[in-house]
Image (cartoon, rainbow, N blue to C red):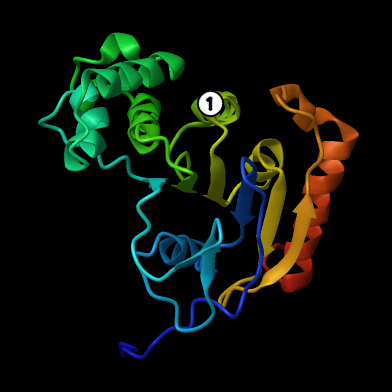
Amino acid sequence: MTDTGDVRALDPVSFGFDKGQILSVVGPSGCGKSTLLRILAGIDAATGGEVVIDGTRVSGPFGDMGIVFQRDLLLDWRNVLDNVMLPAELAKRNTPDMRQRALDLLRELGVHEFSHRYPYELSGGMRQRVAIARALLLRPSLLLLDEPFSALDAMTRDQMNVILQRLQQHEKVSTLLITHSIAEAVYLSDRVVVMSARPGRVLDIIDIDFEKPRPLSIREEPRFTAIARQIRVLFENEGVLAA
């Protein structure tokens, strides 16, 4: 039998973070993380509450943000540079300065030499770098990342974590990252929102005060492992992970 009734994805949740920070939302599959991101982006409407960005209540698509999804959504018939330039074309800002901005982002992300290649010629990690460049092209005030590295192998994911940390600091863009990975959340974030299983609610909000930039080796330090353990215990207490 198929249940066609409504599914409550989220209980009321409340959190915030400062401009220029990275906030991660970590939780089990189906807990409403992606629903939360879609509400923040103005793609889906919330059935209650409100979203406020820079003092502005968001009730529909919010123009001053970039989004990167788990799938890169690159257009296979456009080369790398033309994919990155797409937001500028849609905003009627296809100028030489914007083209240079695209090339600079590709250079910072380590894929500038592939600017005239097509997406099918790139690895998964390279495609996601292009997607990040596209999302940042118009200098958004907010960057939303919906599990952008979940399909990558462990080594490539580590590499992308380092790249994202460096780029986010350089761009000074406020960033919300949806992830399943506790280690990724703790490594990248200034704050971590820990979500319960569906319907998602906030179990805890943990501030991460490690200095940036952070080397990958910080994940081996006792303070890091203690924070990761604190999050795992929250999931264990919820029955999400076996104790």
Which residue is painted at 63% across and 40% down in the image? 184
Mark 1 belongs to which amino acid? Leu
Disc 1 crowd rating (10 Å Cα; few below 14, some 14-19, many 20+) is some
Residue 115 image point, x, y percent: 25, 15
Whether residue 88 is visible, yes or no, is yes
Where disc 1 sits, the SS reads: helix
| Residue at 70% across, 52% down | 192
Give above or below for 132 relative to 101.
below
Give the quarter of the image for residue 91: top left
173 relative to 15 in the view: left or right: left
Above-or-below relation of 169 to 2: above
Q: Quadrant of residue 217?
A: top right
Task: Residue lying at the far left in this picture: please name it.
Answer: 77
User: Percent x, y for residue 15?
Assistant: 66, 64
Residue behind mark 1? 167
Q: Position of residue 202 (x, y in %)?
A: 68, 69
* Camera-nearest residue between 39 and 193: 39
Residue at the (52%, 74%) spot, across then down: 50
In the displayed structure image, the side of residue 209 where residue 57 appears, left or right: left
Q: 143 and 195: which one is in front? A: 143
Q: How many marks?
A: 1
Tell me the quarter of the image containing the C terminus: bottom right
Task: Point out residue 208 in the picture as x, y percentages from the top left corner.
Answer: 78, 44
Classify residue 21 as left or right of residue 135.
Answer: right
**As drawn, 43 above or below 48:** above
Where the N terminus falls, by quadrant?
bottom left
> Residue 152's image quarter?
top left
